[in-house]
Image (cartoon, coloured by chain):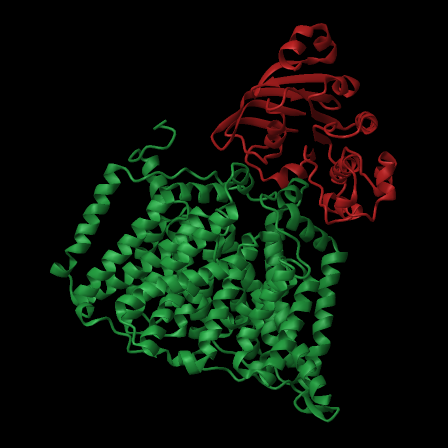
Amino acid sequence: MLEIAAVNSFYGKAHVLSDLSFTVARGQVAALLGRNGAGKSTTMKSIMQLVVPRSGAIRFMGHDLVGLPPHRVAKLGLGYVPEDRRIFTDLTVLENLEVGRQPPRDGTVTWTHEMLFELFPNLAERRHNRGKEMSGGEQQMLTIARTLMGNPSFVLLDEPSEGIAPVIVEQMARVILQLKSEGLTVLLSEQNLHFARAVADVAVIIEGGAQKFHGTLAELNAHPEIRDAYLSV
Amino acid sequence: MGFFIAQLLTGLANAGALFMVASGLSLIFGVTRIVNFAHGSFYMLGAYVGYSLMQVLPGMVGFWTSILLAGVIVGLIGVIVEICVLRPVYRAPELFQLVATFGVILVIQDLTLMIWGAEDKLGPRAPGLAGVVRIMGEPIPKYDLALLAITPFVALALWYLITRTRVGVLVRAATQDREMVGALGVNQSWLFTGVFFLGCALAGLGGALQLPKGGADLLMDFNILTAVFVVVVIGGMGSLPGAYLAAVLISVLGVFGVTYMPQSTLVLMFVIMVLVLMVRPYGLFGRPEVAGEHGQVGEPERPIKPAGAQVRMIVAAGLALLGLMPLYGSSFALVLTTDILIFCLFAASLHFILGLGGLVSFGHAAFFGGGAYVAALLVTYADTPMELAMLLAPLGAGMAAIIIGWVCLRLTGVYFAMLTLAFSQLLWSLVFQWGEVTRGDDGLVNIWPSSWASGTTVYFYLSLVICVGGILFLRHAAHAPFGYALRAARDSARQAEATGINTKRVQWAAFALAGAMAGLAGGLFVFSKGSVFPNELEIARSFDALIVVFLGGVKTLAGGVVGGVALEGVKDVLTRFEYWRLALGVLIIVVVILAPDGLVGTARKLAERTGLLRTPEDSK
């Protein structure tokens, strides 16, 4: 469904992704693993065209994304949940959801406020609160809910477990599995292998912006040396 | 009591147009981060378009239709400007778009002159609302009462649009983080264009609505712009209730000012603004601007370095050529070159705080004109010799910069910029209205150099030495530890603080130095012309310097000087034509679009691409 082929991305002069390639199949939950600075967020941004790759191809359901403006990428059905949340702090929960709202899309779930409030019960109580009045975990839920309002068929989750309380991390894991059961495809970036194990089918490990491993989690578990080389601190 | 109420009502009626223009400016800034200097021009267009429509459409229905249509038409003109001029430069460094909007001002000024002529247009009476109503014995024009009723309605409609509709939600979201709005599937380009339409339509509406009160003239654009900036700054950038409250405050005080202190109406407005900002630095309803908010990320600043041997030789050759000029140049060429030299020093002083300090001042003319007036007043009232006056000019301007800097540097970004503009306008209105001392609009005349320096050639050499010396001094300061500290404060104020630099003090000192240098240029100017008029303190003068710095290239050391030579040279050629503003405006817009790094920056990039110059990486 998503194919990244030999992508090179730069921040100014800094070469962040070098010939990165991997694929994600429909219905999969894929975990993009790597240490701090490995290029996980840049991969996500490159897919969304928030960082435009200098070379390589990114194909999503038959469309080449490279060079498209980000809103066109989103319109194709890619939903992006940024790592630093970036909710609109001056807007209420309902208004934040409104910004994300897009028309229904064939072949994927059409989300309503009720469905999202069922998925994230905390948001229901705070629907008229402004973004800045919410806790970190609630903000994280809101940013996912906001993206789902666009009825994506594929969700990019950048470090969903970062900086939130353990009990909410568990809730995140349940949400991701729920999305999978609804037929959505998910690519999530993580430093936390434990979290990835709980939700992901396949793992892609990157280091220095290049792919070092691509396989199922079972394969990864069978090779502790890979984990030791690229993931442990 | 009745008189008091009548005054209050007039003030409230006047607030209408001001509020509409200010809210439009505020909306556009919120979403696009562009301070649309051309907003006053759209207001002026609204008045002229409305005037023409009212000639065609008769009666009461025609009158109100004309006003609405004027709003729509001006909105559409705004859309054209947004698509043709601003879209290509959204990605340019922050505030560069300003220059493009300067260009738009010039173009609209001349197009209006071409279409409607130089004569002021007397606004038609509103049909059915011609007379006055007596309230507690005082006559109130009926049209004022109509405006009183309309303005809250427009404000409410706008409030509804912004708080209750999807468009409004998107606008507010984009104000905070437009990149994220795009990543959620919203086409930002159309959102920008839509906001531009709305903002310009509001300005046009304001212009058409005030026709029966003020008519239409070619000075409307700058006249309203100052008031609008004051309103937006007092109310808080991006706040509609703030814009409304501030518009009412300024208008009501303006009306009372005319009655009780007719000599200081203009000054009053700025005094109020300064007072508000002392208490609430981000306006009544504004919020602090967060540096580095999501949105625009420019290319990292390149380190600047002292000129290499090659460049030094070119500069030396240029200077030699200049020095020998009296041998081959006509006396007209000498006068023109003197003008250019003085202007270059002025521009270089702005470049010093803008390029190196990151302090965008919209009011640098305060120090240029300030220096000129210090010298002129000394000569007029104290028979001061030229030498002493020229020494005291930078001193006086520097003192002014110390005081103004102390207030302005409490703020950052666009608030700083607008505050500097307000101060320069304050100074301008002081000079303009304090006729007993400054002779107001008549200016101060007969300010001639000492006899030894009165010849064209001698004065040329004097200017050459002082201006080149001043520019070299500024360059030297840029490479001194002081310059490093200033650049550090620009790039990362917090990190600079953490390394022990008192960033505010460094910026304050730089502001004072730049003010003094501008004052020196002003001193030279007044003796070269023999007179000085309030327009040396005007916004247009500050804009000249800004255009020069941006066109030359903010991020390059030579930017100010190169831009100064280019602009003055081009102006000298263009002003011989009738519609030179139009030509200059178009030229500015074209340069902005084609050379977003300024003349020097673009030339350098071209040279690097073609291999004439080495890039910083190559030389590592």
Q: Position of residue B78 (x, y in %)?
A: 55, 62
Q: Position of residue B68 (x, y in %)?
A: 64, 72
Name the side, left or right, on which B499 lies relative to B13: left
Residue under the image location 65 percent in, 74 percent down: B15
For chain A, give the colour.
Answer: red
Q: Residue furthest bottom?
A: B137
> On screen, A110 above or below B110?
above
> On screen, B454 above or below B62?
above
Residue under the image location 41 percent in, 59 percent down: B515
Name the side, left or right, on which A182 lies relative to B197: right
**Front residue of B334 and B496:** B496
**Front residue of B548 and B196:** B548
Name the side, left or right, on which B502 lies relative to B165: left
Indicate the quadrant containing the C terminus of chain B: top left, top right, bottom left or bottom right: top left
Residue under the image location 22 percent in, 61 percent down: B462
Q: Can the viewer see residue B528? A: no
Indicate the quadrant containing the N terminus of chain B: top left, top right, bottom left or bottom right: bottom right
Q: Can the viewer see residue A26? A: yes
Chain with colour green in the figure: B
Q: Residue furthest left?
A: B327
Name the side, left or right, on which A52 lies relative to B614: right
Q: Quadrant of residue B285?
A: bottom right
Q: Position of residue B406 (x, y in %)?
A: 52, 57
> On screen, A103 above or below B536?
above
Q: Position of residue B214 (x, y in %)?
A: 56, 81
Instruction: Give the mark count.
Output: 0
